[in-house]
Structures are given as structure tokens and as C-alpha cells.
Image: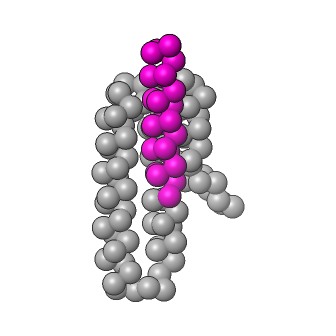
Amino acid sequence: MTKRVINEVSEYLTVCGEDRVYRILSDIEILLKRHPPDVVIGFLNLLRGEFKKELKVLIQENKTSATINELIAKNWRLRMAINIIRNAKREEVKKNAA
């Protein structure tokens, strides 16, 4: 993975609020450097699955909870990070095939 791709993925997994910086997954750079993209994508999908389960339970218990918004945002950010990694992987395969 290139540094540009790693930075873009990190940006999607970082939320800057008024009073703090929150990282959904702080060690994504290390993961992308040490593991193949497919393994990292699999891990991120597992994390998304956990958030989806939590969201489903929360919606059944309390539809007015602000945590629902946070979980939806985390899920979307994880999905975008996965898309960035997949697209970078496709580009790399194209470049190597040419």
C-alpha cells in the first residue's frame, strides 16, 4: 500500500470533534503495512459486522439513542475505508499486469 492510500484510509477512520480526535481504528497504518489488503479488508468487515449487530440491538431497545448515529457513521467510515483499499488493490493489479 502506498502512503497516499494509507493516509486516505486513516482519514476515513478518524473523526475530529470539537473537543477531541477519535479514531475508529488507530493502528490501520500498521495493519496495512504488515498484512495483505485482503486480510485487512476481512478484519474491517468483521468490525463492521460487530457494529451492525450492536446497531440492530440498539434500534430494538431505544430508537432515540444518539449512539445509533455514531454506529451508522462508524459503519459508513469503515465501508469507505474498505472501498479505498479495494480500489488501490485493483489499481496495483492493473499496474502489475501491464
Query: Residue drawn at (48%, 86%), measured in percent from left and top?
Result: 64
Q: Is residue 34 above or below residue 61?
A: above
Q: Residue at x 65, y 59 (%)?
A: 17
Which residue is rendered at x = 34% and y = 50% of the image?
Answer: 45
- Place of residue 42 in the rendered image (x, y in percent of width and height, measured from the top left): 31, 42
Magenta-drawn segment: 76-98
Q: Where residue 59 appears, x then y in whole percent?
A: 38, 81
- Report which quarter residue 15 is drawn in: bottom right
Residue nearest the observer in this picture, 84 or 73: 84
Residue 1 lies, in percent from the top left, at 48, 25
Image position of 52 (left or right of 10): left
Please determine whether, in this image, residue 41 is positioned above or below residue 47. Answer: above
Number of marks in picture = 0
Q: Residue at x 35, y 27 (%)?
A: 36
Q: Is residue 23 visible?
A: no
Horizontal side, residue 78 vs residue 60: left or right: right
Q: Is residue 64 visible?
A: yes
Task: Assess whether residue 86 is covered by the magenta stretch.
Answer: yes
Q: Magenta segment, principal secondary structure?
A: helix
Can you name the residue that lies furthest to the right here? 18
